[in-house]
């Protein structure tokens, strides 16, 4: 038995070199599949794991003697790397300064984001905790303004073809079914957004992706946890900020390209492989403006 993803349906294969094992039991402590046990002072495999190895790699990463190897589910011993010392890791104040310095940027300089910068963003985002491995988060990368403008134009054409979704008659019919809050959201946010996107594009203004030089769409699959693409997108956003780029999350694209034949054709054109319960676009670019003040934000509630 194994937990399925779009990338594999098999479990990971665990190999133990008993000659290296010192019987410390750390692998038993960190494995939540209950795959290990101590027999005769050495670690061996149990015959009743919970799911079968998901290849999280915890056992392989914590083994002090290198006695454990995992292969399968997109993982091998070649994927191990040595962690940096604590002195090389950002402390809380450095991290907080980075977080507080970030603002949503929609004004970009006429400068491309270099391929090496894009790779750094993707590398950082791939470290995000994305559910049961291997990750089922997919990325669509639009790496220049021409591609992004074409996407925005196609998206606005698509929106014009589904404007009935925010028509008065449709909203009137749907209100008893989806309630007051959804009705307010459609009337006061979604309907104006569709109008401003399409009308602005007709005038040559891109208010969908703001003529950003880089856009990355993070989305999942039928097997992915809905939170996974959002977490990965957040890591990418913070990575971009650390590289001196302006960033902005765009939430008004993903929901509209999930249902119906028109949305399927739109996804196919851009090689978006799956419908996804949750997904997020993030735009990046060298900022044309610079903020010197931040704004304090709060949660809706914090109950202790």
Image (cartoon, rainbow, N blue to C red):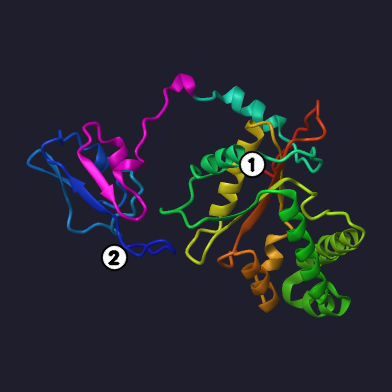
- Corner quadrant of residue 73: bottom left
Tell me: residue 103, above or below residue 73: above
Q: Does 195 sit left or right of 226 as displayed?
A: right
**Can residue 304 be seen from the camera position used here?**
no
Q: What is the number of the mark on residue 261? A: none
Q: Position of residue 84 (x, y in %)?
A: 42, 26
Q: Nearer the viewer, residue 250 or 265?
A: 265
Q: What is the number of the mark on residue 237? A: 1
Q: Residue furthest left?
A: 40
Q: How many residues crowd around disc 2 within 10 Å: few (fewer than 14), some, or many (20 or more)?
A: few
Q: Nearer the viewer, residue 49 or 13?
A: 13
Residue name at image x 79 percent, y 62 percent: 153
Q: Is residue 87 magenta?
A: yes
Residue holding disc 2: 1
| Mark toward the viewer: 2 or 1 | 1
Q: Is residue 41 magenta?
A: no
Q: Nearer the viewer, residue 147 or 255?
A: 147
Q: Rounded to the nearest whole Å, what is the CA distance between mark 2 and mark 1?
A: 36 Å
Question: Magenta stretch?
Answer: 59-88
What is the quadrant of the N terminus in the image?
bottom left
Q: Position of residue 57 (x, y in %)?
A: 33, 45
């Amino acid at each position: 038995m194994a937990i399925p993803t779009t990338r594999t349906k098999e479990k990971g294969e665990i190999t133990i070199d008993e000659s290296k094992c010192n019987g410390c039991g750390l692998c038993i402590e960190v494995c939540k599949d209950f795959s290990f046990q101590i027999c005769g002072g050495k670690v061996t495999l149990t015959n009743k794991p919970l799911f079968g190895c998901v290849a999280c790699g915890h056992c392989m990463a914590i083994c002090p003697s290198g006695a454990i190897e995992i292969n399968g589910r997109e993982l091998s011993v070649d994927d191990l790397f040595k962690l940096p010392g604590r002195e090389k890791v950002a402390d809380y104040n450095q991290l907080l300064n980075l977080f507080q310095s970030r603002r949503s940027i929609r004004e970009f300089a006429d400068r491309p984001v270099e391929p090496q910068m894009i790779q750094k963003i993707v590398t950082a985002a791939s470290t995000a905790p994305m559910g049961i491995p291997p990750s089922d988060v997919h990325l669509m990368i639009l790496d220049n303004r021409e591609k992004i403008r074409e996407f925005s134009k196609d998206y606005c054409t698509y929106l014009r073809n589904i404007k009935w979704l925010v028509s008065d008659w449709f909203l009137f019919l749907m209100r008893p079914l989806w309630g007051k809050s959804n009705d307010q959201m459609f009337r006061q946010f979604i309907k104006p957004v569709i109008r401003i996107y399409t009308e602005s594009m007709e005038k040559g203004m891109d208010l969908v992706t703001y003529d950003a030089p880089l856009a990355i769409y993070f989305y999942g699959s039928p097997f992915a946890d809905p939170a996974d693409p959002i977490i990965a997108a957040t890591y990418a956003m913070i990575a971009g900020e650390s590289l001196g780029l302006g960033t902005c999350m765009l939430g008004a694209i993903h929901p509209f390209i999930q249902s119906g034949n028109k949305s399927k054709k739109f996804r196919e054109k851009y090689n978006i492989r799956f419908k996804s319960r949750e997904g997020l676009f993030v735009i990046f670019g060298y900022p044309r403006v610079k903020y010197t003040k931040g704004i304090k934000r709060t949660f809706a509630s914090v109950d202790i």
